Amino acid sequence: MILHNVAIIAHVDHGKTTLVDKMLQQSGSFRENQRVAERVMDSNDLEKERGITILAKATSVVWKGTRVNIVDTPGHADFGGEVERILSMVDGVIVLVDAAEGPMPQTKFVVSKALKIGLRPIVAINKVDRPDARSSEVINEVFDLFAALDATDEQLDFPILYGSGRDGWLAASPEGPKEDGLAPLFDLILDHVPEAKTEPGPFRMLGTLLEANQFLGRIITGRIISGTVKPNQTVKVLARDGSVVENGRVSKILAFRGIERSAIDVGEAGDIVSIAGLVKATVADTFCDPSIDTPIQAQPIDPPTVSMSFLVNDSPLAGTEGDKVTSRVIRDRLLKEAEGNVALKVEESKDKDSFIVSGRGELQLAILIETMRREGFELGVSRPRVVLQKNDAGEIVEPIEEVVIDVDEEHSGVVVQKMSERKADMLEMKPSGGGRLRLVFHAPTRGLIGYQGELLTDTKGTAIMNRLFHAYGAFKGEISGRNNGVLIANEPGEAVAYALWNLEDRGPMIIEPGWKVYQGMLIGIHSRDNDLEVNVLKGKKLTNIRTQSKDEAVRLTPPIRMTLERSLAWIQDDELVEVTPKSIRLRKRLLDPNERKRESRKAEAELA
């Protein structure tokens, strides 16, 4: 059967996964009476809850006797490593662009990677039914983007389709016809995307995606470049430097057929398949016939820009809510994650009780922490820090990001002011329709940590911020952090409503009555810039004297909900987030107040 491999790439929320749903439906991949969930490709719990794609996943459809392998990719920049890996599996890309928003930072990132390796794009303008759609302007913006990314003449001569992925139609004109559904897209893939490339010789495949299966063990997905592979066949695995990782037998070959993955008798060159049976092989390794000695060159992956310390939980409540608490268990889990996620880097610290985990951004690391806590892990996590480097001249350089903020005109002033405080340089300010402005900045990653929540507060929830790693640039100097101090519990026990009520004039709370607290745990935000130790266990003194007026009822202001992402962005360097399967608590790194005083005096002496 003729094979075509294509990836769908776009910015977050531009409709990739919804379009794949309709492609599967209209190609006959589902039975007529089959019940199918919305966004069927977003299969894990976190993807369903957040409505975003986190992991790249493959599927396939048959159209006019030709098999089309489709790879659905994440749209968020923090998961860009997933996109970089899968581009080696495909021969063409569908660039999906929102008809109102136009090309956004992540569109630019994935398109640059695709153009660099010579893939020819198909541009699909999605959501043309939006009231603020501006299809013709967006096409011009896409062309300008391709030209700026040094696209070849052949890549600039891209075909264009317009339509609505949600309604299941794409056509050569924004007006339709809509009756043909996605047939124009399928026909264009067959005409425009080259047949799957194959090379002569014995079996070779580059590992691209890694997953664990409780029945089959490690499963590696990739595209077969040459030869064929069958169950029980002996294969050799080569690392990127050509050294032998292992020799083993393939126990099972799985191929994507619709949303199912079916066992097949032979994997042929050009097809995207999953191989089970090997123990040590991982992403970017070459799976090949024993006669092969040269590995396939994998595409280089952009370096991590943000790191965090993962520590063994040493709080007084450690081990009460989770069952995976030791450093050995945490270490094994992190190393297992780093094997399959090439954009993640794990290093052991000198004290062996903490691990430095580096990734593309706070969201990527927060997703890892959330996944671990759902698996029963307890750990302490430090504030995100940027990964600094030295240039050829020996000067310290830091990661700079391109930031695009869409905001109502009335709030643009405060956004520009806050970004300038974070050492950002404004590149562009232009109207984006509907009384909104699009502001483009180059800002140090350090200054953006924790800004998302502040931005939404400043703009009454109307601003949309998109970020993308731009380059390493000169160190921008000190950036002011949090302005407020914290309220710290001074005794262990359970928080009392009366005590919290009495403390409300000191600042908003982040805990509720009945919560277990311990010495050194953060219970609120101080209204001033210093930290304050407070007693949250103090109940109301009861007497036997009755008065004519009723006792004053305790009416508490609802506490601030500190989600995992918000906590990571808000804490300072001397604080930690304690993460357990049931709770997220904030605490000081040093719980003893005397130790904290000694540490602060020591820091002051060093500065002096």
Image (cartoon, helix red, strand yellow):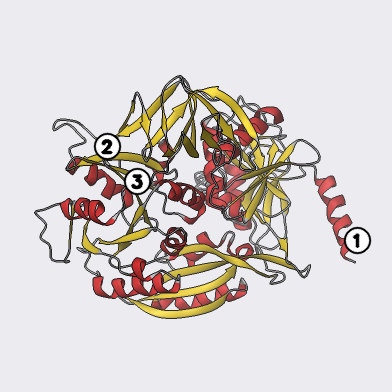
Using the image, determine if residue 470 lies above or below residue 570: below
Q: Decide if residue 364 is on the left or right side of residue 489.
A: left
Residue at position x 71%, y 32% in the image: 316
The residue indicated by pointer 2 is 37
Q: Position of residue 214 (x, y in %)?
A: 48, 21
Rendered-image quadrant of the C terminus: bottom right
For the N terminus, the image quarter is: top left
Element on which disc 1 rests:
helix
| Residue 105 placement (x, y as % from top left) | 45, 65
Report the residue at 70% width, 60% height from top: 388
Task: Give the residue number, with chain letter if any, for mark 3.
Answer: 196
Mark 2 element type: loop
- Mark closest to the chain's N terminus, 1 or 2: 2
Does the residue at mark 2 contact the one at mark 3 (Cβ under 8 Å)?
no
How crowded is the residue under tag 3: few (<14 C-alpha within 10 Å), some, or many (20+)? many
Single out the mark in the foreground, 3 or 1.
Answer: 3
- Of mark 2 and mark 3, the one earlier in the sequence is 2
Of 196 and 540, which appears nearest the observer? 196
- Is residue 224 visible in this depiction of the protein? no
**On the picture, is 214 further left or further right than 395?**
left
| Number of disc labels | 3
Is disc 3 in contact with disc 1, using a CB cutoff of under 8 Å? no
Task: Estimate how packed mark 2 is, as few (under 14), some (14 to 19) or many (20 or more) residues with alpha carbons within 10 Å.
Answer: few
Amino acid type assigned to the residue bearing label 3 in the image: Ala
Q: CA distance from mark 1 to mark 2?
A: 61 Å
Percent from the top left, x then y, of residue 173? 16, 66
Q: Which residue is mark 1?
A: 605
Q: CA distance from mark 2 to mark 3?
A: 30 Å
CA–CA distance in space, label 3 to label 1: 66 Å
Q: Residue at x 74, y 45 (%)?
A: 589
